[in-house]
Image: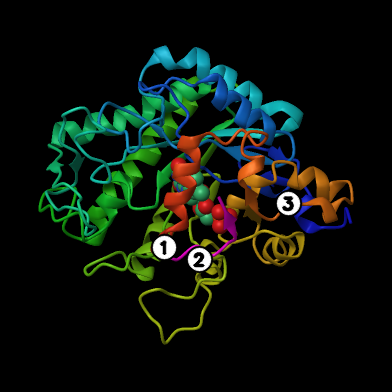
Amino acid sequence: MTEYKFLKPLTFEHKGITLKNRVIIPPMTERMSFEDGVVTRDEIDYYSQRAGGAGMFITGTAGVNGEAKGFEGQLSIADDKFIPRLSELAAAMKRGGTKAIVQIFSAGRMTNSKILRGKQPVSASAIAAPRPGYETPRPLSNEEILQTIKDFGEATRRAIQAGFDGVEIHGANTYLIQQFFSPHSNRRDDDWGGSLVKRMKFPLAVVNEVNSMIEEYAKTPFILGYRISPEELENPGITLDDTLALIQALKQTKIDYLHVSQGDVWQTPLRDSSSNKIVNDVIKEAIDGAFPMIVVGGIQTPEEAEATASRYDMVAIGHELLWEPKWVQKVENGDEKSIRYQLSQSDLADLGITPTMLEMIGLTTGGINNIPFTMPYHG
Ligand SMILES: Cc1cc2nc3c(=O)[nH]c(=O)nc-3n(C[C@H](O)[C@H](O)[C@H](O)COP(=O)(O)O)c2cc1C
């Protein structure tokens, strides 16, 4: 049973960093932080329980500045005061040789003035998200854009100082970086919008700033990942061709991996129902070996993980790891029969799943990237 490809190590060639296996725990906001974003004991317990098995463990996304917060109880990395508790979190996640990554983001228009305590959400342009109840954001000025890019860099410095093994830039799931890339949310006619090349400018500036902070502060090799959502359903919206162009541009940067956020690893193009190509295949071809890719979406069983890992480089397992924290260890020990495949009310306390996290899981069952979520849930 240890012949599974997903249990084999993987090396990020640029930096010579080796993951002990190819199973990744994707970022999952658990809404357990204190109101200001400081890591809580509950959070450390929750992450500790899931550490040690996977090759790499990515935190729920952490806000890089005062306008970044998207959910109550979200992690923050917006100030040096967060470093001590983030260090404890990194140490808990790294137990057993798992690499600990912190995902960094700003929610942009995907938040509201209540969560921001009276402040208006910000974005590329004053266009509300096309979902019921979303507020119209305020477009960032040129100076604010430059400051936000620096905030991503400062967040990276803090991640290094807290002892994480890397950062993942959250360029997916409709948040601020994606909002700059999207022709739906970015209607600017200055240097930061208009053409495809200009829509890429903010994402690439963030990558380059993060990389320069890594070069300045990291004393040991430090991983730089980037997460994308390949397509948007809106019109106008991000097309697969736009994403392929972004990937070509990312190949000129120093990223170590690309993380493709989808609700189904075998997803075919959302905007072109006549195509039966698998989006991840199209992306793999575009990457052409420049860096490894992580795929995610609906993987639960070792057989599903193997089918995925034998085609792509790394496989992320989200929901399933919520209710089966020892998934990797059980596979390694040949104890696959005891893998838990559903969440039960009676297990919540043992699993360290708080009521706020449960609410978050409930939200995601409505769909991620507009794809309905169909795994069993018995809450
Ligand atoms: C509770 C919850 C919180 C999530 N939070 C984040 C997040 O902070 N950042 C992110 O990029 N994706 C987030 N996601 C999406 C997951 O990373 C993953 O892409 C998604 O759950 C699909 O994988 P799965 O089918 O294996 O669960 C979240 C998902 C869940 C269930």
What is the spatial separation of the Cα atoms under label 2 and label 1, in whole angstroms?
9 Å
Q: Earlier in the sequence, mark 2 or mark 1?
A: 1
Q: Which residue is mark 2?
A: 283
Q: Are marks 2 and 1 in contact (CB under 8 Å)?
A: yes
**In front here: 285 or 32?**
32
From the image, give the main secondary structure of the stretch colored magenta. Answer: loop
SS category of the residue bearing label 2: helix
Q: Earlier in the sequence, mark 3 or mark 2?
A: 2
Residue type at mark 1: give it.
Answer: Pro
Residue 175 locus on image (x, y percent)? 32, 47
The amino acid sitting under disc 2 is: Ile
Tell me, for residue 230, which label it has, or none: 1
Q: Provide the residue span drawn in magenta.
A: 371-379
- The residue at the point 87 percent across, 57 percent down is 3
- Would you say the beta carbon of the disc 1 residue lies within 8 angstroms of ligand 1? no
Q: Position of residue 318 (x, y in %)?
A: 58, 50
Q: Which residue is mark 3?
A: 340
Q: Earlier in the sequence, mark 1 or mark 3?
A: 1
Q: Position of residue 138 (x, y in %)?
A: 12, 41
